[in-house]
Image: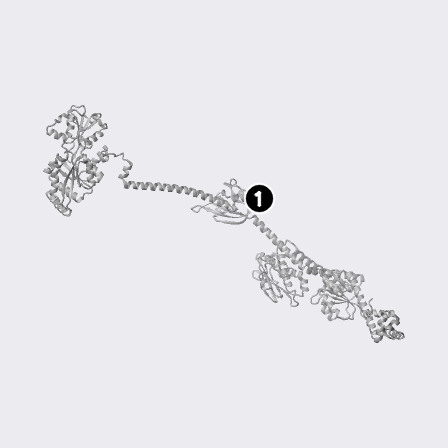
Amino acid sequence: MNKFKLLLLVLLFSLSLTSNAKNISIAVLAFSGEEYARTSWQPTIDYLNAHILKHRFKLVPVEPNKIEYLEQLVQQQKVDFIITQPVSFVEFQVKYGATSILTLVDESKSSKFGSVIFSRSDSDIINLPQIRGRSIAGANPKGLGGWLIGYNELKQHNVDVVDQSQVSFLGVQDNIVNGVLNGSVDVGIVRTGVLERLSNSGRIDLTKLRILNQKKVKDFPYLLSTALYPEWAFVKASHTSSLIAKQVASTLLLMSPGSKEAVARGYWEWVTPIDYQPIHELMKKLRVGVYKDFGKISFLQYVKENLILSAMFFIVLIVLIMTGLRVLKLNNKLKVVNYFIEQQNNMILDSVSEGIYGVDLSGRCTFINQALTDIMGWEKKDMLGKLQHEILHHTHADGTPHLSHQCPVYKTFMDGTARFINKDTFWKKNGDSIFVEYSTTPIKDKLGSIFGSVVVFKDITQQIEHQQLQKQYEQDLEHVSRLNTMGEIVTGIAHELNQPLTVISTTAFAGSKLIESNQYSASKFLDIFSTLSKQAEHAASVIKHMRKMSNKDQSDYSLIDINVRIKGVITLLQSFIKDNNIRLMLDLDQSLPLVFVQAVQIDQVALNLCKNAIDAMSIMNSNKVLGISTKCLNEAIEVSVIDTGSGIDPSIAEHLFDPFSTLKKNGMGMGLSISRSIIERHYGNLYLEQSTPGMTIFKFTLPIQKNS
Amino acid sequence: MSKATIFIIDDDQQVRVALSLLMESVGWEVKLFSTATSFLEQFDSSIPGCIISDIRMPMMSGLDLQMKLKERSMAPPILMITGHGDVAMAVRAIQEGALDFIEKPFNNQYLLDKVHKAIKIDADNRETKLRLSEVNEKYNRLTDKEKEVFGLIIKGALSKQIAEEVFVTQSAVEARRSKIMEKMNADNISDLMKMAMTMDMINV
């Protein structure tokens, strides 16, 4: 023990060396007046001054009614330590962050105390519940032992004394005892030890009193009705340096128990602080002092007391509210956007000119757009949920049924492949059919599995009618051009036809003259009849060619020998060739394969080219040659038409194949244009191979049909 | 005088043959040519007859042939063969002196009639030409003074008028007149008038 104290001294010494000298104020709560406090506590202060040389300790006694003054001093840091009772300590602790560094041990060597609740021994009050409705006396409302502890005990026994008229606070505790004894009050509450002190001094007779709710606690020497609570505390203000606090605490701890300094104030010694939590609990329960509003704390107060938490709470609240508002706003916006998108989708769907509809896996229509209704006449009520194939697609254009398993829309969601159909028939509500081209595209969900298809279609009826008209127009134009060419060569043809007719008529006439003159012989007549027959055949062939060329509809395809056709064309042109003194040179490949063509159209091309060649040489006097050759290329036959005319000017050659481009005075300018379109329709080429003075070559090719 | 011959010129052999058959069937002599050029090369003006020529032929046309023949002293009349639509050429041929044109196919009887007529014309032409040469020959035997009186006689002048005109006596005119009659081998004034007409000295 001595060793321990020596150690503390050394520690104390070393601490005192490092601290700065300072005046230290120690306030004490003066219950019994300033004067008594000064005299009774001064020895303790002196003891500190004696042992802690570095600082000057000064006593500041404060009476309980000046407690607010003390609080000011603490706030202004003019008081460093406070020696006070537990309730007061709790107030400083809660309000100003003060801490207890020591707890006082009283004369009875106990660091705890409680209350004694008593009545007169002849009173009818023998237990706590009986106090209900009776008068009761305490020291003062904030006094612990002389009121609060006892009052708490009463409350625990459901005895509430809210009626102020019932309760009287008598200040000095002796008065309470006397009050009970003389019957002015029914019950008294005093601090433990008071009764023993009065009894020991012979001022009261304990037997005249009845202790209510008496409790026995081991090592506690006094009469007791309640739980025990910690004694007075030596309190350090929050601003006081803990170094000084340690010096003070250790110095007082070293004070000898029962020393003259302690006895001067009536205590035994100082010990390390014990738990003051029971005081807090008591004050909370009774709503005393700082805990006056405990349990009914105002919002504002709570906020003040829990500023950071509240601020955080508010921030969180604001954030939550803002987030909520934002979410609400976004939600609204989303709704608007959703609505807008939906509207826009509908608008887009309805604004496109193509008909659009959706089909589910069962082939039922899931949506249609306005254009579909406009084009087909079918409305939503006609289509939605119905089998689209049965409505739109049931029959081919030729009247044969369109089987649903052949429907491209079905095939699309069967195999997941998008399709484009360039011509098909859809049926309108009024029973008419239209030609359509359409695409059908599979629709897939997020996982990629198909749940239907979308069909986008276009009415191409007009387009197809236009194509047919165009074809008709081309055919008409070809016919007109052909007739035009025929018109140009008609004198030649007439001449060509006149020759055999002349020969026939003259020979026949001569024959009859011979018979008249009886000069004939059988061999002569054989010659005559042979001539007649040959000439008639020749005439017939010319007529046949002419009729073919003049016919309007020449769209039949057939297998032809191009050499035969060229000879036929030359028949028509024979007189022109002759009259123009043109030498005809034919170089026809006899092993040409047949070609599958519209024969008369090809004749027309050959006739055009030959006629052009003849015309090109008309103004020349000599060296006029028309050459026609045929030969077999790899996959086509090639026909060349050659003349020895002056050639075509390059600037004209450029536009040679344009419609209405002509080198002739009375030409239509359609010949080459139409010829080229005919050859191209047969997948061949027609072109000017060469054109120089003295040698112009046009060529055309026709593909050879491999399988025909 | 040799026999009348029909010269047939056509590039079409069949037509040539048919025409020759026709001409032969009525007994004419026929000569065939495939081109106008070959005809001209073998042309003999002494052979009477007529020409049947196609108007459209390569190298030399019927019209060209007609022009060439005009240069010759004695050419047979030409019948032009035309096709359909050759009207313009046919008209030109007529203007240039062709006897006629015959369109193919022929009206054969008409053709034969035309051939007959042509041959007759040719014969007449030949006779006229013969007479003219005879008259010219006689006329050229006259002296200049006789030619002067001849001219006045065919104008119908009397001897007295002639005497005044040529400043000689009337008896001298009479002497010249008888000399002219003798030289011209004329019996009377009428014969003289015919001869004058033959020589184109009188417009009828």
Residue at mark 1: chain: A
- Where residue A187 appears, as percent x and y from the top left, is 18, 26
- Where residue A279 appears, as percent x and y from the top left, is 20, 35
Residue at (50%, 45%) from the top-left corner?
A: A351
Q: Quadrant of the C terminus of chain A?
A: bottom right
Between A263 and A269, the residue placed more toward the observer is A263
Task: Give the left or right position of residue A706, taking residue A94 as reference.
Answer: right
The residue pinned by badge 1 equals A432
Quarter assignment of residue B204: bottom right
Task: Give the left or right position of residue A268, taking residue A635 as reference.
Answer: left
Snapshot colouring: one colour
- Where residue A75 appears, as percent x and y from the top left, is 21, 40
Query: Can residue A373 be seen at all in this image of the molecule?
Result: yes
Between A601 and B72, the residue placed more toward the observer is B72
Q: Quadrant of the N terminus of chain A?
A: top left
Looking at the rendered structure, the kind of residue marked 1 is Asp
A521 in relation to A291, above or below: below
Between A343 and A485, the residue placed more toward the observer is A343
Between B66 and A631, the residue placed more toward the observer is B66
A177 in relation to B2, above or below: above
Query: Can residue A555 be seen at all in this image of the molecule?
Result: no
